[in-house]
Image (cartoon, helix red, strand yellow):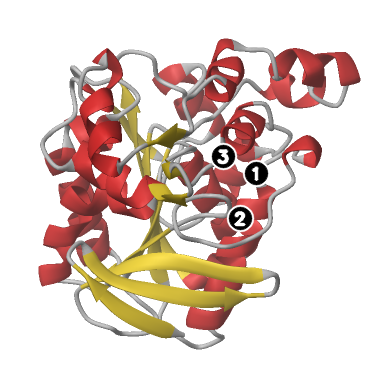
Amino acid sequence: MTETSIDAGRRVTLMLGDGAMSALRWGGARTPPDLIFLHANGFNAEAYSPLLAPLGERAAVVALDMRGHGLSRLPTTPDSLTDWWPYARDLVAVLDQWVPKGAPPVVLAGHSMGGITAILAASRRPEAVRGVVLADPVLMPPMLRWALYMPWARARARQTPLASGALKRRAVFPSKAEALATYATRKAFSTWQPGFLEGYVEGGFVDDPDGVRLACAPEWEAANFAAHRHSSWSALARLAMPVRLFMAETGSTVSGGLARLASAAPKVEASMVPGTSHFIPMERPGVIRQALADMLDRTR
Protein backbone atom coordinates (compact mmCIF):
# COMPACT_ATOMS: atom_id res chain seq x y z
CA MET A 1 0.00 0.00 0.00
CA THR A 2 1.36 3.43 -0.94
CA GLU A 3 0.17 6.86 0.16
CA THR A 4 0.50 10.39 -1.15
CA SER A 5 -0.92 13.62 0.28
CA ILE A 6 -3.60 15.77 -1.32
CA ASP A 7 -5.70 18.58 0.05
CA ALA A 8 -8.90 16.52 0.36
CA GLY A 9 -7.21 13.79 2.37
CA ARG A 10 -4.42 11.29 1.98
CA ARG A 11 -4.60 9.31 -1.24
CA VAL A 12 -4.25 5.57 -0.59
CA THR A 13 -3.70 2.78 -3.11
CA LEU A 14 -4.72 -0.81 -2.37
CA MET A 15 -3.73 -3.66 -4.65
CA LEU A 16 -6.55 -6.09 -5.41
CA GLY A 17 -6.34 -9.23 -7.49
CA ASP A 18 -6.86 -7.53 -10.85
CA GLY A 19 -5.65 -3.98 -10.33
CA ALA A 20 -5.32 -0.96 -8.07
CA MET A 21 -8.08 0.59 -5.98
CA SER A 22 -7.67 4.22 -4.97
CA ALA A 23 -9.13 5.77 -1.83
CA LEU A 24 -9.00 8.82 0.39
CA ARG A 25 -8.15 8.64 4.07
CA TRP A 26 -8.87 11.15 6.84
CA GLY A 27 -7.86 11.02 10.47
CA GLY A 28 -5.51 8.39 11.82
CA ALA A 29 -3.80 5.82 9.64
CA ARG A 30 -5.04 2.90 11.71
CA THR A 31 -5.69 -0.42 10.00
CA PRO A 32 -8.47 -1.33 10.08
CA PRO A 33 -10.00 2.15 9.86
CA ASP A 34 -13.08 2.99 11.89
CA LEU A 35 -15.27 3.79 8.86
CA ILE A 36 -15.29 2.84 5.16
CA PHE A 37 -17.56 4.89 2.86
CA LEU A 38 -18.82 3.92 -0.62
CA HIS A 39 -20.03 6.44 -3.23
CA ALA A 40 -22.93 6.45 -5.68
CA ASN A 41 -22.87 5.33 -9.32
CA GLY A 42 -20.87 7.78 -11.43
CA PHE A 43 -19.43 9.51 -8.37
CA ASN A 44 -16.13 9.17 -6.52
CA ALA A 45 -14.58 9.34 -3.05
CA GLU A 46 -13.60 13.01 -3.28
CA ALA A 47 -17.20 14.06 -3.96
CA TYR A 48 -17.93 13.27 -0.30
CA SER A 49 -14.96 15.14 1.20
CA PRO A 50 -17.12 17.87 2.81
CA LEU A 51 -19.17 15.15 4.51
CA LEU A 52 -16.31 12.95 5.69
CA ALA A 53 -13.33 15.23 6.36
CA PRO A 54 -14.73 16.62 9.66
CA LEU A 55 -15.07 13.05 10.97
CA GLY A 56 -11.31 12.69 10.60
CA GLU A 57 -10.93 14.72 13.77
CA ARG A 58 -12.37 11.84 15.78
CA ALA A 59 -11.98 8.68 13.70
CA ALA A 60 -9.98 6.95 10.97
CA VAL A 61 -12.11 7.33 7.84
CA VAL A 62 -11.61 5.89 4.35
CA ALA A 63 -13.67 6.55 1.20
CA LEU A 64 -13.10 4.20 -1.74
CA ASP A 65 -13.07 4.95 -5.46
CA MET A 66 -15.04 1.92 -6.59
CA ARG A 67 -14.28 -0.11 -9.70
CA GLY A 68 -14.56 2.02 -12.83
CA HIS A 69 -14.70 5.25 -10.85
CA GLY A 70 -12.32 7.98 -9.70
CA LEU A 71 -8.64 7.11 -9.69
CA SER A 72 -9.07 3.34 -9.29
CA ARG A 73 -7.58 1.23 -12.05
CA LEU A 74 -9.66 -1.93 -12.11
CA PRO A 75 -11.04 -3.48 -15.32
CA THR A 76 -14.68 -3.05 -16.31
CA THR A 77 -16.88 -4.96 -18.77
CA PRO A 78 -20.10 -2.98 -19.28
CA ASP A 79 -21.67 -5.45 -21.71
CA SER A 80 -21.53 -8.34 -19.23
CA LEU A 81 -22.47 -6.49 -16.02
CA THR A 82 -25.67 -7.93 -14.53
CA ASP A 83 -25.45 -6.99 -10.84
CA TRP A 84 -23.43 -5.01 -8.29
CA TRP A 85 -21.59 -7.97 -6.82
CA PRO A 86 -18.31 -6.90 -8.51
CA TYR A 87 -18.31 -3.88 -6.19
CA ALA A 88 -19.20 -5.99 -3.16
CA ARG A 89 -16.47 -8.50 -3.97
CA ASP A 90 -13.97 -5.63 -4.18
CA LEU A 91 -15.12 -4.40 -0.77
CA VAL A 92 -14.84 -7.90 0.66
CA ALA A 93 -11.26 -8.01 -0.70
CA VAL A 94 -10.57 -4.71 1.09
CA LEU A 95 -12.04 -6.14 4.30
CA ASP A 96 -9.90 -9.26 3.87
CA GLN A 97 -6.83 -7.01 3.78
CA TRP A 98 -7.80 -4.60 6.52
CA VAL A 99 -9.99 -6.67 8.83
CA PRO A 100 -8.43 -10.13 9.12
CA LYS A 101 -9.85 -12.60 11.60
CA GLY A 102 -9.67 -11.17 15.11
CA ALA A 103 -9.24 -7.54 14.02
CA PRO A 104 -11.70 -4.88 15.23
CA PRO A 105 -14.72 -4.66 12.88
CA VAL A 106 -15.50 -1.47 10.96
CA VAL A 107 -18.54 0.67 10.21
CA LEU A 108 -19.60 0.56 6.56
CA ALA A 109 -21.56 3.40 4.98
CA GLY A 110 -22.69 4.24 1.48
CA HIS A 111 -24.84 6.42 -0.71
CA SER A 112 -27.11 4.97 -3.41
CA MET A 113 -25.17 2.18 -5.17
CA GLY A 114 -22.55 2.46 -2.44
CA GLY A 115 -25.21 1.62 0.11
CA ILE A 116 -26.07 -1.60 -1.70
CA THR A 117 -22.37 -2.43 -1.94
CA ALA A 118 -22.13 -2.04 1.84
CA ILE A 119 -25.19 -4.26 2.39
CA LEU A 120 -23.92 -7.04 0.13
CA ALA A 121 -20.41 -7.02 1.59
CA ALA A 122 -21.72 -6.93 5.16
CA SER A 123 -23.92 -9.94 4.40
CA ARG A 124 -20.84 -11.80 3.12
CA ARG A 125 -18.43 -10.71 5.89
CA PRO A 126 -20.63 -9.93 8.94
CA GLU A 127 -17.82 -10.57 11.41
CA ALA A 128 -15.86 -7.65 9.90
CA VAL A 129 -18.69 -5.09 10.15
CA ARG A 130 -20.04 -3.58 13.39
CA GLY A 131 -22.57 -1.16 11.92
CA VAL A 132 -23.99 0.13 8.62
CA VAL A 133 -25.26 3.59 7.63
CA LEU A 134 -27.17 3.96 4.35
CA ALA A 135 -28.14 7.13 2.45
CA ASP A 136 -31.00 6.35 0.04
CA PRO A 137 -29.71 2.95 -1.11
CA VAL A 138 -31.05 1.63 -4.41
CA LEU A 139 -33.48 -0.98 -3.08
CA MET A 140 -35.38 -1.90 -6.22
CA PRO A 141 -38.65 -3.89 -6.37
CA PRO A 142 -37.85 -7.62 -5.95
CA MET A 143 -39.79 -8.47 -9.11
CA LEU A 144 -37.36 -6.35 -11.12
CA ARG A 145 -34.51 -8.63 -10.10
CA TRP A 146 -36.31 -11.68 -11.45
CA ALA A 147 -37.42 -9.88 -14.61
CA LEU A 148 -33.80 -8.99 -15.42
CA TYR A 149 -33.05 -12.65 -15.99
CA MET A 150 -35.13 -12.31 -19.17
CA PRO A 151 -33.17 -10.98 -22.18
CA TRP A 152 -35.97 -8.62 -23.20
CA ALA A 153 -36.10 -7.06 -19.72
CA ARG A 154 -32.35 -6.53 -19.61
CA ALA A 155 -32.45 -4.83 -23.00
CA ARG A 156 -35.29 -2.59 -21.83
CA ALA A 157 -33.42 -1.73 -18.62
CA ARG A 158 -30.55 -0.40 -20.71
CA GLN A 159 -33.01 1.96 -22.40
CA THR A 160 -34.41 3.57 -19.25
CA PRO A 161 -34.00 7.36 -18.90
CA LEU A 162 -31.18 6.99 -16.35
CA ALA A 163 -29.19 4.54 -18.47
CA SER A 164 -29.77 6.31 -21.78
CA GLY A 165 -29.06 9.66 -20.14
CA ALA A 166 -25.74 8.39 -18.81
CA LEU A 167 -24.73 7.29 -22.31
CA LYS A 168 -25.36 10.82 -23.58
CA ARG A 169 -23.20 12.50 -20.95
CA ARG A 170 -20.44 14.72 -22.22
CA ALA A 171 -17.27 12.82 -21.35
CA VAL A 172 -14.51 15.29 -22.29
CA PHE A 173 -13.94 18.92 -21.29
CA PRO A 174 -10.98 21.23 -21.98
CA SER A 175 -10.36 21.49 -18.23
CA LYS A 176 -11.81 20.70 -14.81
CA ALA A 177 -12.58 24.39 -14.43
CA GLU A 178 -14.82 24.32 -17.51
CA ALA A 179 -16.50 21.11 -16.34
CA LEU A 180 -17.19 22.73 -12.97
CA ALA A 181 -18.58 25.88 -14.58
CA THR A 182 -20.85 23.79 -16.82
CA TYR A 183 -22.17 21.62 -14.00
CA ALA A 184 -22.77 24.64 -11.78
CA THR A 185 -25.49 25.79 -14.19
CA ARG A 186 -27.44 22.53 -13.98
CA LYS A 187 -30.51 22.15 -11.82
CA ALA A 188 -29.46 18.69 -10.64
CA PHE A 189 -26.65 20.23 -8.59
CA SER A 190 -28.49 23.32 -7.38
CA THR A 191 -29.43 21.82 -4.00
CA TRP A 192 -25.90 20.70 -3.11
CA GLN A 193 -24.09 22.37 -0.24
CA PRO A 194 -20.77 24.16 -0.97
CA GLY A 195 -17.76 21.98 -1.71
CA PHE A 196 -19.52 18.87 -2.96
CA LEU A 197 -19.63 19.78 -6.64
CA GLU A 198 -16.00 20.87 -6.51
CA GLY A 199 -15.04 17.51 -5.01
CA TYR A 200 -17.16 15.65 -7.54
CA VAL A 201 -15.30 17.32 -10.41
CA GLU A 202 -11.84 17.15 -8.83
CA GLY A 203 -12.07 13.43 -8.17
CA GLY A 204 -14.19 12.51 -11.17
CA PHE A 205 -11.99 13.54 -14.10
CA VAL A 206 -8.67 12.25 -15.37
CA ASP A 207 -6.25 13.61 -17.95
CA ASP A 208 -7.14 13.25 -21.62
CA PRO A 209 -5.35 14.38 -24.82
CA ASP A 210 -8.17 16.89 -25.31
CA GLY A 211 -8.20 18.10 -21.69
CA VAL A 212 -9.95 15.96 -19.07
CA ARG A 213 -12.46 13.13 -19.33
CA LEU A 214 -14.89 11.47 -16.96
CA ALA A 215 -13.13 8.83 -14.88
CA CYS A 216 -16.36 6.81 -14.87
CA ALA A 217 -17.01 6.08 -18.53
CA PRO A 218 -20.61 6.79 -19.59
CA GLU A 219 -20.92 3.18 -20.78
CA TRP A 220 -20.01 1.88 -17.32
CA GLU A 221 -22.34 4.28 -15.53
CA ALA A 222 -25.18 3.27 -17.86
CA ALA A 223 -24.47 -0.44 -17.33
CA ASN A 224 -24.77 0.03 -13.57
CA PHE A 225 -28.20 1.60 -13.94
CA ALA A 226 -29.41 -1.59 -15.66
CA ALA A 227 -27.67 -4.19 -13.45
CA HIS A 228 -29.98 -5.18 -10.58
CA ARG A 229 -29.88 -8.96 -10.28
CA HIS A 230 -28.36 -8.77 -6.78
CA SER A 231 -30.77 -9.67 -3.97
CA SER A 232 -30.40 -6.52 -1.89
CA TRP A 233 -33.63 -6.85 0.11
CA SER A 234 -32.80 -10.33 1.41
CA ALA A 235 -29.21 -9.30 2.14
CA LEU A 236 -30.46 -6.30 4.13
CA ALA A 237 -32.89 -8.46 6.11
CA ARG A 238 -30.05 -10.85 7.08
CA LEU A 239 -27.85 -8.19 8.65
CA ALA A 240 -27.60 -8.63 12.41
CA MET A 241 -25.46 -5.56 13.16
CA PRO A 242 -27.09 -2.12 13.72
CA VAL A 243 -28.28 -0.54 10.47
CA ARG A 244 -29.36 3.10 10.07
CA LEU A 245 -31.09 4.01 6.81
CA PHE A 246 -32.12 7.43 5.49
CA MET A 247 -34.45 7.80 2.51
CA ALA A 248 -35.16 10.90 0.46
CA GLU A 249 -38.48 12.71 0.58
CA THR A 250 -38.56 13.13 -3.21
CA GLY A 251 -37.32 10.64 -5.79
CA SER A 252 -36.14 8.05 -3.27
CA THR A 253 -34.65 4.82 -4.61
CA VAL A 254 -36.04 2.82 -1.68
CA SER A 255 -38.92 1.06 -3.40
CA GLY A 256 -41.96 0.75 -1.17
CA GLY A 257 -40.59 3.35 1.24
CA LEU A 258 -40.73 3.08 5.01
CA ALA A 259 -43.67 0.68 4.95
CA ARG A 260 -41.75 -1.88 2.90
CA LEU A 261 -38.67 -1.46 5.11
CA ALA A 262 -40.73 -2.05 8.25
CA SER A 263 -42.11 -5.25 6.75
CA ALA A 264 -39.06 -6.68 4.97
CA ALA A 265 -36.28 -5.54 7.31
CA PRO A 266 -37.90 -4.65 10.66
CA LYS A 267 -34.56 -4.43 12.53
CA VAL A 268 -33.38 -1.56 10.31
CA GLU A 269 -33.74 1.88 11.89
CA ALA A 270 -35.14 3.91 8.99
CA SER A 271 -36.41 7.45 8.51
CA MET A 272 -37.18 9.95 5.77
CA VAL A 273 -35.20 13.21 5.62
CA PRO A 274 -37.62 16.08 4.84
CA GLY A 275 -36.80 18.37 1.95
CA THR A 276 -34.29 16.03 0.32
CA SER A 277 -33.83 14.34 -3.03
CA HIS A 278 -31.69 11.27 -3.75
CA PHE A 279 -28.63 13.45 -3.01
CA ILE A 280 -29.13 13.44 0.77
CA PRO A 281 -25.40 13.53 1.65
CA MET A 282 -24.91 16.65 -0.48
CA GLU A 283 -28.10 18.37 0.70
CA ARG A 284 -28.09 17.46 4.42
CA PRO A 285 -24.49 16.48 5.19
CA GLY A 286 -24.97 17.29 8.87
CA VAL A 287 -27.68 14.65 9.19
CA ILE A 288 -25.55 11.90 7.63
CA ARG A 289 -22.38 13.00 9.44
CA GLN A 290 -24.14 12.87 12.80
CA ALA A 291 -25.50 9.42 12.00
CA LEU A 292 -22.00 8.22 11.14
CA ALA A 293 -20.62 9.67 14.38
CA ASP A 294 -23.46 8.10 16.36
CA MET A 295 -22.86 4.69 14.77
CA LEU A 296 -19.13 4.90 15.51
CA ASP A 297 -19.89 5.69 19.15
CA ARG A 298 -22.73 3.21 19.48
CA THR A 299 -20.76 0.24 18.19
CA ARG A 300 -17.38 0.78 19.86
Contact, CB < 8 Å: mark 1 with mark 3? no
Q: Amino acid at mark 3?
A: Ala
Decide which of tag 3 and tag 2 comes sooner along the chain: 2
- Of labels 1 and 3, the one closer to you: 3
Query: Of residues 195 and 294, which is closer to you in this image?
Result: 195
Task: Look at mark 2 in the image and give the residue it sits on.
Answer: 88
From what the image shows, is residue 203 above or below residue 151? below
Decide which of tag 1 and tag 3 comes sooner along the chain: 1
Q: Amino acid at mark 1?
A: Trp
Q: CA distance from mark 2 to mark 1?
A: 7 Å
Query: Of residues 274 and 277, which is closer to you in this image?
Result: 277
From what the image shows, is residue 187 above or below residue 57? above
Q: Amino acid at mark 2?
A: Ala
Contact, CB < 8 Å: mark 2 with mark 1? yes
Q: CA distance from mark 3 to mark 2?
A: 20 Å
- Find the residue positioned furthest to the front: 209
Task: Look at mark 1 in the image and give the residue it sits on.
Answer: 84
Q: Position of residue 148 (x, y in %)?
A: 79, 24
Q: Secondary structure at mark 2?
A: helix
Task: Look at mark 3 in the image and give the residue it sits on.
Answer: 217
Q: Which residue sits at x=79%, y=21%?
A: 154
Q: Position of residue 224 (x, y in %)?
A: 62, 34
Q: CA distance from mark 1 to mark 3?
A: 16 Å
